[in-house]
Amino acid sequence: MTDDATRLGGSDRSGPDRRPDHTGDQPGDDAPTRWLRLNLDDPADERPVDGEKRPADEEKRPVDGKKRPVDETTRTDERKRDERRGSAVAAGRTRGPREWVAIGSFVVGAVTVATFFAIGAWQRRWIADDGLIVLRTLRNLFAGNGPVFNAGERVEANTSTAWTYLLWFWAWVTDGQLEYVALWVALVLSVAAIPIAMYGTARLLRNRIGGVTGDGYTLLLPLGAIVYIAVPPARDFATSGLENGLCIFWAAVLWCLLVSWSRRANGADATRGGAAATLFLAFWAGLAPLVRPELAVVGGIALVLVFLAPLSWKMRVGVVVVAAVLPVGYQIFRMGYYGLLVPNPAVAKDASGSKWGQGFTYLANLFGPYTLLLPVILAVVAGVLMLIGARLRRLAPAPAPAGDSASVDSASGDAPASRRDRLAGWSRALQTPTAVTVAILLAGAIVFVYWLRQGGDFMHGRVLLTPLFVLLLPLMVIPVTIPVHGVVAAFRRTPAAVSTDDANTGENTGEAINGGVSADDAPEGTDPSAGIPATETPVPDVPDASTRNRRTRLQLAGSVIMAGLWVTTVVWAAMVHETVLPNAGIDIGRSGIVDERRFYVTNMGNENPVTAADYLDYPRMQAMVDNIAEHEKEGGVLVASFNYDEWYYIPLPQSTPQDKRTLTVYFLNLGMTSMNAPLDVRVVDQMGLAYPLAAHTERLEDGRIGHDKVLPTEWVVAESGAVPRRPVLPGFLDEDTVRQAQVALTCPDTRDRFASFEGTWTWQRFKSNLKQSFGFNNYRIERNPEYEIQRCGLTMPQRINPR
């Protein structure tokens, strides 16, 4: 084998001295060393190691396709270099100062960004009202009532199944207060996601060390990571008790697994280590719907990528099994236990609904205050520059495998590749860093568009944080390379070319002469010199002075631009990281979107509300606790009044048996209410997060986003069996509406839905729920009891108070 073949990505595929194919991770590599193995993933990008310089006569190749004789001394030197390269990799050692610069810059950047994020998240620590909802389920789990929100009602009030059981596990292990368990788990996952995501991108970029010229010093600087942590909602929802931290942590780990998988050579998954890594990737991607239902798009695209890549059918079956076992198993349990295909909040918020106008309002609510479009544009420009740099870096096409039909076509004009060969080529192309990058960007864009269609959320920025994080993954760090050789010479005037042959030197020499295929890249059995005039003389394949100077200038210009983009991003982050929305905490506004944390901080006078007890300072909460203590044993319904300090109490009839005397609290803020109420007190809400009756009503077109299902209070009075007449009934409630609701509740389909989640869970009920869950998922009732009676074909009751 010759050195020039090695440098250009070619290899002597028939000789005993063939250089090993460094397209995948090598045995014995530790994690930091693997991503630092400079250019080993792309043989076309290899450079001399250990500072050695090849003799000029070794760096020349003929254009006639014949190999030059190599003396034994040259072959021995080359073998020693290969042995030193393999020994360094096996020993886990870095390979020079350029790698140390890349490592140092990456570590400093990752530690700095993670530290700033942790400090910012801790300063803004809190548990949201919605974050307390999941803790009510944990209390019921520990009390032996099952994974329910109210004892005796099988309702899944939490959107993220994985978040529920992750908190349950850590609460069981630590025996800590639930609010602080949620706080710390969310904080750790959120902060850990940042360096993990940066590491995945650094692995993606490890071939870029050295830059276009190959001899520069590359700094891996955080860019996407800075953009994410600078947005205030990212720090707000790092400790909110919601599943945001779990979502970005899952996405970051998936990104690292996909990048690692793309670095393994096609067919490497047949080995034990490769197979285990691929199966774990499939398992992790399969967790997507349990983390958040909409993340099934991200996990699904990743699984399709792995499934269609080169694998044996046995491995494909394994990928499907390990990916499906947990989510499919839980889905069967959900259908049989809860009687629905999705979590109850997905029904309450009509997750398949469409409110495009509100979605763009939500987008502007996030992008506008922070001028977020600026760093997004800067990130796009950085990505384009990285693509250009990668293109320029390739001195010659990568070697085509012997017998590759596509290469034979382009080189010698043989018959086109067969359909099977084309499919195999497409399959191999899926297991590449490019395919992984495109897939993750596509997945993030789909989730982003989904939330625009859905209308976003009432919490400022919350639901767009995860797709924003996913879209930033390929740019979490960017390479800025400083060329160190020939910078001065690059700006000097070079002598004019003495012949037309000189114009073909450089990275395009072989391509220009051989029709796009270099001599060493041509497959065996082909003549790359076909069609070349006999008068052509061999041309060296190394860039001449003018080409080297041009590449140095391009590298320097690109580095200056990339550095400018990074500095601009840092300045932007410093300017917006403490931006507060106008009227935050005072006015929700016509859009219905609110800075949730600032709203509660302002209304309670507590900068860091964490526990349920902290929320007793919120209007009505202390009065609610007092009323529960007074009426808990009697049962009935508690309805909030309009003066913020009182509750209306509607008792049960005197004839109600003692074992049926349940107290029901009906209030919008489900988290603080449920966590300050005993487990034997029933807590329901008019939106339907924990109340199927409200969840199955129709969505109000002009309702506040996230609150566009408002069940009239008369339904709760009728459903709980409270006294429906005045003077017991509060004056703002209508007796006739209560009576109509009593009749509407006898609708057969509605009674079947109640039967699916009430009462004892038996094998018969499990089977029945499995069948009925498909219909229950789309079942809707009319908010107005009078219209519901008409829909069900029931008899309208006589009015108590004639109109």
Image: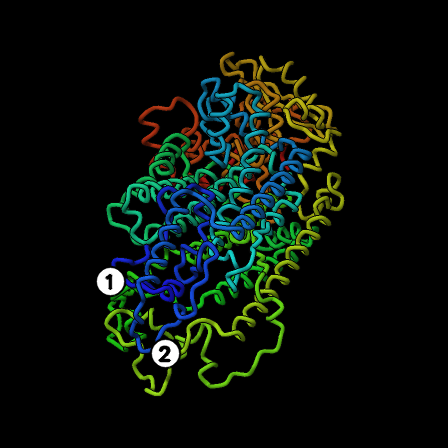
Q: Residue at x 72, y 28 (%)?
A: 619
Judge whether residue 722 can be spotted in this image.
Answer: yes
Q: State whether residue 790 is above or below residue 500.
A: above
| Quadrant including the N terminus | bottom left
Where is residue 407 shown, x and y percent of the image?
31, 70
Q: Secondary structure at mark 2?
A: loop
Q: How many marks?
A: 2
Q: Residue at x 66, y 59 (%)?
A: 564
Cα separation between marks 1 and 2: 25 Å
719 in relation to 599, above or below? above
Q: Of the numbered discs in the image, which one, if any, rests on residue 91?
A: none
Q: Residues within 10 Å of mark 1 (few under 14, many from 20)?
A: few
716 and 318: which is toward the camera:
318
Q: Amino acid at mark 1?
A: Ser
Q: Is residue 788 something that shows in the picture?
A: no
Tell me the mark number nearer the camera, choosing from 1 and 2: 1
Q: Quadrant of residue 136?
A: top right
What colouring does the structure picture have? rainbow
Q: Amino acid at mark 2?
A: Gly
Expressed as whole percent of the image width and height from the top left, the position of residue 182 reads 56, 28
Which sits earlier in the primary sequence, circle 1 or circle 2? 1
Query: Residue 341: x and y, percent?
Result: 41, 39
Quadrant in which the C terminus appears? top right
In-front residue for pair 798/731:
731
Crowdedness near tag 2: few (<14), some (14–19) or many (≥20) residues, C-alpha within 10 Å: some
- Tag 1 secondary structure: loop
Q: Which mark is residue 515?
A: 2
Residue 14 is tagged as 1
Place of residue 536 in the rendered image (x, y in percent of width and height, measured from the top left): 37, 85
Measuring 55% from the left and 48% from the top, which residue is drawn there?
A: 469
Q: Quadrant of residue 603 in the image? A: top right
Q: Is residue 274 above or below residue 681?
A: below
